[in-house]
Image (spheres, rainbow, N blue to C red):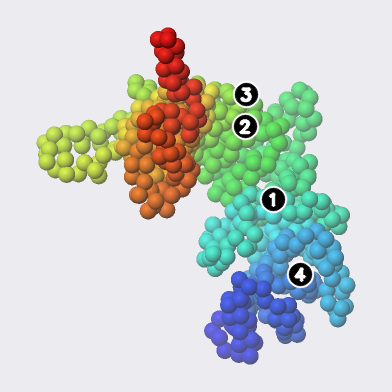
C-alpha cells in the first residue's frame, strides 16, 4: 500500500502506468482507445472512490484535460448521483472542477450535440448534464459557497453556465496560483488561464441562461448572503459571479452589486429612481451608516477584494452614488490603511466625471505626502491616471506631487524624485556625501567612477508615475526634467524594464517636440551600441530612431554602423540592424560614386528625402545659371 493512498497496489499500478504514458505523450495526440481504457477502468472501479484518492485524483485531472469530450461528459454524468460527496471532498472536488473547466474549451455545438456512449442509460447532452449539476448545487448553495472545496466547484459552474472564462488571478488565491504553476510548469498556457474575463460563447444556450437566472436568484437568497464579502471562500464566488454577469448581462450585474451593498449595510434599501427627491432620501438613509460600513469592509483583508471587484464592474451611476454617500470624508483614512488603500485605487480607476474627480482630489491632494510616507504609491499613480483620463485637476495634481516630493524649488529635477519615489532632498543627500568623500580621496573615487556613474534611483512604480504624468495635457515640467537627466542617468533608465516605458511615453507625448527629442539623442550619443546590444535598451534605440528626424537618424546610423560587427554578434543588436534598416542604408551609401558622394544627400534619399537636405544641388544649379 502507498502511504499517500488507500487503494490497492493493482489500482495504483494501473494509474501509475497511465500517468507515465500521459507524461511521455502529453505533447502528442494519444489515441482514443487509451482514454477509453482509462475511463472504463475508472467507471467500473468506483469513480467516486478513485476521485477521492490523493494520488489518483491528480492523474484523473491530467487525463481529463487531454481526453475527448465524450469521456468528460460521461465522467460528469456519473457525478450527478453523488454530487454532494464529490463537491465537498478535498480531492474529488478538484476533479469535478477540472471536468467543468473542460466544458469551456468546447464549442457551443459540441456542448449541445455530444452524447454519451450508447451503452449508457443517459442520452443527455453535455448542456443537460451541466444543468443537472447546477440544479443540485443550487439546492444546497449556501453550504457549497461557504465551503473551502465546494466554492471552487461553484466558481467553475458559474463560468460554464454563463459561457465566460474568468482568470485564475480572480478565482484562485495567490498560494493556489503558485501551486498550479509549479505543477503545470511550461504547460501553464494549456490550462486556458486568462487574466480578467473573456466570453467563450457568443450566444448562450437557453438552458444555461435559465440556469444562470436561477443561480443568481438563489445566491441573493442565501441565508448567509450578508457575509459573502467577508468570507474568504464566498468572496471568490461573488467575484466570479460579478465578472461573468457583467460580460453576459450588465443589468443582472448592476442588480447584484446593489443587492450585495445593501445586504452589507453600505447602501440603504431606499429606492433611488434618479429623481432629486429619491436621491436625497437615499442619501439621508445611507449617511447614517454607509460611510462607516464601507470603511469597515475596505479595511478587512478579505472584503476589500470584493469591494475592488464591485468598483471594477459597477455602473457610473453606482460609482457616483458611492462617492457621494459612502466614500466622502473617508478617503484619507482609507488611503492610509494597508488594505483599504487598494479600494481607493480602484475607485480612482472608476472615476468618470469631473464632480467625482473634484471630490476625490479635494480630499487626497493636501495629504499626498502622508500617503507617500505609508508607501501607498498606488494611490498617487491611480490619482494621476484618473486626472489624465477625466481631464480635470491635472495642474493641481502636478503641483501637489511637486510639494509632496519637495521639488517645488527645483522642478527641473522632479524626475529624480518621482522615479525614486522619494523626496528630492533625500535623493540629493547621498550625492552630496559622495562628492565630499570623492574630494578627500580622488584616487579611490576615480577607480570607482564606472560603478557610481549614475546616481539615479529607479523604482517600477516611480516609472508608472512618470508615465502617467506624461499623458496629461501639460507635461512640460516632466518633459524638461527628463531632458535634464545626465547621459549616464538616461542610459541607466533605458536599461531598466520599467524605465524603457518612460521613453515610450516620452516619444508618444505630443508635447515632446523635436528639440527635446534631439537633446535626448545628443545625450545618448556614444552609448547607442551599448544600448543596442542590451535586452531592454535595444527597444529604446528603436524608439529613438523611429521618432527622430533625419539629422539625428544619420548620427545614430553612423555610430551604429561604425561597430556593426558588435551588433551582428548580439542577439538584440541584430534586431536593431533590421528595425533601423541599417543594411539598406549601408548598401545605398556604397553604391553612390565617390565623386558625387554627399552624406546628407545619400542619407536623405535613403531615409526620408527631406527637402532641407536636398537643397544644396539646387543652389549649385542656380550659381551656374547666374555665371552663364
Q: Is the Cβ of the residue at disc 1 closer than 8 Å to that at disc 3?
A: no
> Which-is-in-front pick, marks 2 and 4?
4
Is tag 2's residue or tag 1's residue first in the polypeptide sequence?
1
Residue 559 drawn at (x, y percent) = 35, 38
Q: Is the Cβ of the residue at disc 3 closer than 8 Å to that at disc 2?
A: no
Label 2 to label 4: alpha-carbon separation: 44 Å
Label 4 to label 3: alpha-carbon separation: 52 Å
Asked if residue 577 shows in the view, the reply is: yes
Q: Secondary structure at mark 2?
A: loop
Asked if residue 132 shows in the view, the reply is: no
Q: Residue drawn at (73%, 60%), measured in percent from left and top?
A: 104
Q: Secondary structure at mark 1?
A: strand
Q: Which mark is residue 69?
A: 4
Instruction: Classify the position of the C terminus by image quarter.
Output: top left
Is tag 2's residue or tag 4's residue first in the polypeptide sequence?
4
Q: Secondary structure at mark 3?
A: helix
Crowding around mark 3 (Cα neighbors within 10 Å: few <14, some 14 to 19, many 20+) is some
Q: Which mark is residue 198?
A: 1
Crowding around mark 4 (Cα neighbors within 10 Å: few <14, some 14 to 19, many 20+) is many
Q: Is residue 555 above or below residue 94?
A: above
Is tag 4's residue or tag 3's residue first in the polypeptide sequence?
4
- Please state which of residues 25 and 288 is positioned toward the viewer in this rendering: 25
Instruction: Classify the position of the N terminus by image quarter.
Output: bottom right
Q: Which residue is mark 2?
A: 351
Q: Is the Cβ of the residue at disc 2 closer than 8 Å to that at disc 4?
A: no
Residue 609 drawn at (x, y percent) = 50, 28
> Which-is-in-front pick, marks 2 and 1?
1
- Please state which of residues 314 and 627 is positioned toward the viewer in this rendering: 627
Residue 458 drawn at (x, y percent) = 38, 40
Crowding around mark 1 (Cα neighbors within 10 Å: few <14, some 14 to 19, many 20+) is some
Q: Which residue is mark 3?
A: 354
Q: Is residue 49 above or below residue 97?
A: below
Amino acid at each position: 500500500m502507498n502511504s499517500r493512498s488507500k487503494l490497492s497496489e493493482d489500482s495504483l499500478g494501473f494509474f501509475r502506468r497511465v500517468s507515465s504514458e500521459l507524461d511521455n505523450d502529453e505533447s502528442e495526440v494519444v489515441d482514443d482507445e487509451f482514454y477509453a481504457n482509462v475511463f472504463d477502468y475508472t467507471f467500473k472501479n468506483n469513480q467516486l472512490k478513485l476521485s477521492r484518492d490523493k494520488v489518483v485524483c491528480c492523474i484523473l485531472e491530467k487525463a481529463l484535460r487531454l481526453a475527448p469530450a465524450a469521456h468528460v461528459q460521461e465522467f460528469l454524468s456519473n457525478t450527478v448521483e453523488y454530487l454532494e460527496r464529490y463537491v465537498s471532498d478535498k480531492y474529488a472536488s478538484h476533479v469535478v472542477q477540472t471536468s467543468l473547466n473542460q466544458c469551456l474549451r468546447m464549442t457551443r455545438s459540441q456542448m449541445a450535440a455530444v452524447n454519451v456512449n450508447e451503452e449508457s442509460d443517459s442520452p443527455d447532452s453535455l448542456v443537460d448534464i451541466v444543468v443537472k449539476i447546477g440544479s443540485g448545487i443550487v439546492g444546497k448553495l449556501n453550504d457549497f459557497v461557504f465551503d473551502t472545496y465546494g466554492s471552487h466547484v461553484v466558481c467553475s459552474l458559474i463560468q460554464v453556465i454563463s459561457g465566460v472564462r474568468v482568470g485564475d488571478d480572480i478565482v484562485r488565491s495567490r498560494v493556489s496560483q503558485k501551486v498550479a504553476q509549479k505543477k503545470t510548469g511550461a504547460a501553464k498556457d494549456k490550462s486556458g488561464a486568462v487574466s480578467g474575463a473573456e466570453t467563450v460563447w457568443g450566444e448562450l444556450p437557453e438552458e444555461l441562461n435559465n440556469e444562470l437566472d436561477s443561480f443568481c436568484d438563489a445566491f441573493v437568497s442565501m441565508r448567509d448572503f450578508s457575509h459573502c464579502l467577508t468570507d474568504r471562500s464566498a468572496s471568490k464566488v461573488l467575484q466570479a459571479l460579478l465578472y461573468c454577469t457583467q460580460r453576459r448581462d450588465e443589468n443582472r450585474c448592476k442588480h447584484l452589486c446593489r443587492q450585495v451593498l445593501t445586504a452589507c449595510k453600505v447602501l440603504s434599501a431606499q429606492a433611488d429612481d434618479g429623481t432629486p427627491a429619491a436621491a436625497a432620501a437615499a442619501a439621508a438613509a445611507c449617511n447614517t451608516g454607509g460611510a462607516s460600513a464601507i470603511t469597515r469592509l475596505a479595511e478587512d483583508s478579505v472584503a476589500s477584494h470584493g469591494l475592488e471587484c464591485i468598483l471594477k464592474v459597477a455602473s457610473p451611476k453606482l460609482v457616483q452614488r458611492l462617492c457621494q454617500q459612502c466614500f466622502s470624508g473617508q478617503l484619507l483614512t482609507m488611503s492610509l490603511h494597508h488594505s483599504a488603500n487598494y479600494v481607493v485605487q480602484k475607485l480612482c480607476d472608476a472615476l468618470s466625471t469631473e464632480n467625482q474627480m473634484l471630490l476625490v482630489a479635494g480630499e487626497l491632494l493636501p495629504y499626498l505626502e502622508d500617503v507617500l510616507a505609508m508607501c501607498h504609491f498606488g494611490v498617487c499613480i491611480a490619482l494621476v491616471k484618473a486626472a489624465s483620463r477625466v481631464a480635470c485637476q491635472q495642474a493641481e495634481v502636478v503641483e501637489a506631487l511637486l510639494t509632496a516630493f519637495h521639488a517645488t524649488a527645483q522642478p527641473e529635477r522632479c524626475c529624480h524624485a518621482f522615479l525614486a519615489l522619494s523626496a528630492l532632498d533625500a535623493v540629493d543627500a547621498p550625492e552630496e556625501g559622495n562628492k565630499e568623500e570623492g574630494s578627500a580621496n580622488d584616487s579611490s573615487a576615480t577607480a570607482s567612477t564606472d560603478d557610481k556613474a549614475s546616481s539615479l534611483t529607479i523604482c517600477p512604480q516611480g516609472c508608472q508615475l512618470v508615465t502617467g504624468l506624461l499623458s496629461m495635457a501639460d507635461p512640460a515640467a516632466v518633459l524638461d526634467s527628463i531632458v535634464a537627466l545626465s547621459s549616464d542617468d538616461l542610459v541607466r533608465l533605458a536599461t531598466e524594464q520599467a524605465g524603457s516605458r518612460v521613453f515610450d511615453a516620452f516619444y508618444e507625448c505630443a508635447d515632446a517636440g523635436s528639440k527635446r527629442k534631439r537633446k535626448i539623442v545628443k545625450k545618448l550619443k556614444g552609448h547607442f551600441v551599448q544600448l543596442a546590444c542590451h535586452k531592454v535598451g535595444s527597444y529604446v534605440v528603436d524608439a529613438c530612431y523611429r521618432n527622430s528626424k533625419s539629422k539625428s537618424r544619420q548620427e545614430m546610423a553612423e555610430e551604429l554602423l561604425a561597430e556593426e560587427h558588435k551588433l551582428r554578434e548580439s542577439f538584440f543588436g541584430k534586431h536593431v540592424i533590421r528595425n533601423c534598416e541599417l543594411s539598406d542604408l549601408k548598401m545605398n551609401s556604397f553604391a553612390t560614386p565617390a565623386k558625387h558622394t554627399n552624406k546628407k544627400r545619400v542619407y536623405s534619399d535613403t531615409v526620408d528625402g527631406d527637402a532641407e537636405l536636398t537643397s544644396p544641388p539646387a543652389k549649385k544649379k542656380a550659381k551656374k545659371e547666374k555665371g552663364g
